[in-house]
Image (cartoon, rainbow, N blue to C red):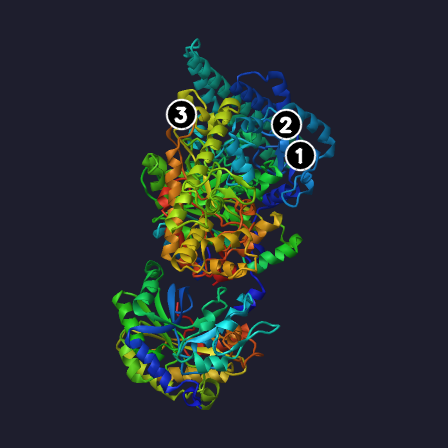
Amino acid sequence: MEQSAGLNRLVNLVDYYFTLGGMQIQFNVVSKETLLRAQEDPSKYQNLIVRVAGYSAYFVNLEKKVQQDIIERTEEKI
Amino acid sequence: METMTQEPFHYQIYNKPVRTERIDHLYHYVGASKVGMCMERGRIITEVYKKNRYWPPILLRAVTLKTILEQMSIYIMPGSLLAGNQASKPNYAPLFPEFAVDFLEEEFIYGRPYFPDERPADKIEYSREDMPELKEMINFWKGNTHKDRLYANLPKEAISAQDDVGAVNIVNFMHGGCGHLTPPWPWLFAHGLKEIIRICDENIAGLEMWTIEGMEKNRFYTAAKTVCEGMITYAKRYAALAMELAKKEEDKTRKKELMELSIICNKVPENPAETFYEALQFMTFVQFGIQIEDNAQGISPGRFDQVMYPFYEKDKKAGIITCDSATELIENFFVLLSTVERMRSWDDTAYFRGKPIFQNLTTGGTDPETGEDATNELSYMIMDCIANTRTLQPSHYVRWHKNTPLEFKLKIAETIRLGTGFPAIANDELYIPAMINRGYDPKDAADYCIEGCAEPGVAGLRGGRTGAAWFCLAKILETSLYNGFDPRSGVTLHQNKNGKDLETFASFEEVWEAFMDQMQYYARIHVIMDNTTDRLWEEYMEEPLTSVLGCTLTCLERGKSIKRGGAKYDFTGNETIGTANAGNSLYAIKKLIFEDKLLTGGQLKHALLTDFKDMTTNPTGAEIQQMCLNVPKYGNDVEEVDMLVSKVLESVCMELPKYKNTRYGRGPIGGIFQASTTTVSSNTPFGMLTGSLPDGRSNGMSLSDGQSPMRGTDTKGPTAAVKSVSRCNNLLLSEGSLYNMKLLPQDLRD
Amino acid sequence: MSAYLAGTFSKKDIDWGKKMTENKEGIIFDIQRWSIHDGPGIRSNVFFKGCPLRCKWCSNPESQEVYQELAFFRGKCIGCGRCITNCPYQAITPSEEGNIIDYTICQRQCYQGKGGYACTSQCYAKALKVIGEKVPLPDIMKEVLSDSKLYEQSGGGITVTGGEPFTQPDFLLELLRFSKEKGLHTTVETCAFTSWKYFEPALDYIDFLFVDFKLYDEEKHIAYTGTSNKIIKENLCRINEYAKNHKLTLVIRTPVITGINDSEEEIRLIAAWIKEHLSEVHIYQLLPYHRLGRGKYHDIGKSYELEETEPPAADVIGALEQIIRSHGLDIKYD
């Protein structure tokens, strides 16, 4: 398995959230640019999966408003 | 750094999945089949109901399912090592006309608002040739569906709360059964369905059939037996099909595979499973069977790594399985589960965008007996399978705790980095105490798995009903600002007790009072809607298979189905949404009107009703919106606003358990309502129904999702955001918490 | 000519900065939690305002002056026009392309501790913002300590950066002393252009020190940063002496700017100097130039000279790092 500082930070963040009393967390790991490109040219991004809420879905199959919701979510720097 | 943002790197796109030829082929085979409508189930059930309509419901439901399992088309996908299907083709959704036909008529027959194959999203293919038959089917059911009964039975104000105001919503449970449970796999694998049939026979023999209780129990045991027999027939049909295919097959290896599959399908689920392969095929049949029964979601494989490990270990020692062959089987299983589809109305798809079937698989966690970490080899393999298959179903959770090995945590992080959203992470140190707090036995709680979005259950012990009605706090707050009046629909269902509105509130306490008042009013409506649904399910939509495979031991012992109190634990959950909007809005009112006195309540009220667009006022609507937007927001580690959000959530958590569900006092532990913060995608449709809010959000915009901060308002980095979210009293969220965080792939690259 | 002499950074400013810190208040312009490139682990960065250097590539131009400045974020402006009427000095005029601010009026009227900034009072969109805030020490500590659990898990802590932390030496010392009292790992990022009398007492409270060595040649250093590098070299040697018998990690960094110091010769000279004079230094890190600071110049009414400069290519950096390694130095600290 690949070891990397980024993965360690992700683990740190989850550990930190849970020591504070967090209960559940789920992630989207995708940039706004990728999502915007997928919106523009859906045929190239047919298999792009994103997390909506308690489940995942193909981004290009989502309705525009839900796509927008995901695009607008804050990108946390990690 | 900049060059990277110009050329976005995305793990899912650049890291190609590693699949065996078989899995790759199956993946594309399923992918090539578009989402469609399958007439078969609808056709069969209509025939059965035509003949036996006035039978006692549980017997009627049992014979219906048995007939479907005997008659529906079955197929084995080319190369597949496992058998099972829900409809005539992959990604085809069966019809459940007994639940609702109104939308089938509107959409398939009249194309209102769209013909299903012309929808802007979530399209459904179908054959126009089937329409005359569908029309006839609709005519048979019209007026006698579950939904019709609900509308006839619900008080007018409850219907108005859903259809006019849009503060609560149960449409999801108008179109199907309850689901949301995990079968007791170890027991089923060890005993097989023949043992259930034996227990039923034994119990029937001892019943006092001349009493009402005896008659009722007789119905249950007979129904349970009938559906188990149906399941055995269903499996044997695959056995025959596999044999037939084997005979025709020219490739020697495949021929052998099909013959082996045939032997297994003859054996399980009737008999106990003895190998990893048999257990997996057993699980596959049960997954499909329950989903065919009543269109339920959240039928979960549960703690897969725990349940399957004993088989894996044994087979590996015996030399009949390797890590690679087991991985391929699991991946085959994933692809098979991904063929499940659910027919949703266009309206309902707004709440469930995509393909949320919620067949949840939970990995990792603790051993309930020893309390020690339970991560095993399969846990790691499952993470690989997620990366390799990349199917939307099953959905995945991992349980995370203090003693989860760092190596496994890193493996999880690596899987998350792919960006499929899998797995989500549940904190054992919160989920377990939250369940114990509601009455779960500590050992049972320690064995929890996720069923649905984020709701905890225990295999074989919890009787579904997680994530019941949607409960939109943002909308409820909005009505409290206008003395109960809903500006969009023009409806007032309940006036504030203090009779005041945003213009006349004299203090923040009065605002809070009004909000609490409306929240309590709508919580009552929420309970009425859920309990009415439950009562009608119980009376007309019995689910013998779900009961006897979902909560096997208690249902068999009590001789009744889950909906009559057959489960060990029974809670009705809720799905609270727009929490951040409600809390942020209350804080903005507190700050702008009562503390900094930058605005009067009248000014804010006018600005909200004109969607911040009136430029003739001083300050102008646009300026007022900026004032609202710039009040500190939840998600930035600002204690004052975080505590208000927490208080809002806590009030819901305290209010709901005051109500009992329909199984209270009928056997299960619990029997009350409890809160969660799951949203699915309902924050979008609820947002469309919710007007401008004091947090600066414009009319109609999507609300905040889950327990997350309102998107774009958490600007102080991840630590501040998680600090805010963890300030909520999560221990009270015994139905689960949901927090979405978005990260950039390039940040995880180093 | 130094910034000091050029008049952009006067002695008065330092005096004023010192006065502020007498009350244990610092002038800071940001606290950034979850910082990952400024020392080991996950850290919180405290950005001090004020810097004696004027590097042409500076990516934090708002950090240069020790006093408060006005920033105008054009994207946020909703054009309500309240700032125009609220400014008593007529510094803001409307135009087709949005409001135009005459920063020379701001300099005269509101900057250098005079305050006022009436234009921001009713800017509801927060398009106009005063950069730099006098923040009491306990408030900074509260924010920094709020992530202390995370520092423990990741081996992180506090990083004081800027600007140049040593423009507020007394406050810096207080902040570091206080952080050590709370058991935090401390990192400081400095250009080392300061009097040794300020540096020496602070060292006892620093675990990890980044010192920028921007250019080897003194003339060039003056030309591109406005100051001589003589004091910097002297301070580095003194720090090295200190590090010989104290637990201090000293890391040298060079921001690599295309066309200015991206030559192999330049890096070779610096690396050789480090080997010759700094026995305690084992890590010499390169920071490739980026353009993220560009927009900020415009926001605070300054002009940017490196408009045309491109970030150095990956292979250029790779070659330079090879030189560093060939001197027996590491290029990364963890």
Q: Amino acid at mark 3?
A: Thr
Percent of width and height locating residue C57: 50, 79
Quarter of the picture holding the N terminus of chain C: bottom left
**Cβ atoms at labels 1 and 2 below 8 Å apart:** no
The earlier-in-sequence mark between 2 and 3 is: 2
Foreground pick, B551 / C334: B551
Percent of width and height locating residue B375: 39, 45
Residue bearing the label numbered 1: B106
Residue bearing the label numbered 2: B42
The earlier-in-sequence mark between 1 and 2 is: 2
- Residue B573 visible in image: no
Q: Check the residue under mark 1 and report the chain it is in.
A: B
Percent of width and height locating residue B530: 47, 32
Quarter of the picture holding the C terminus of chain C: bottom left
Q: Is residue B626 above or below residue C177?
A: above
The earlier-in-sequence mark between 1 and 3 is: 1
Q: CA distance from mark 1 to mark 3?
A: 42 Å
Q: Amino acid at mark 1?
A: Glu
Q: Amino acid at mark 2?
A: Gly
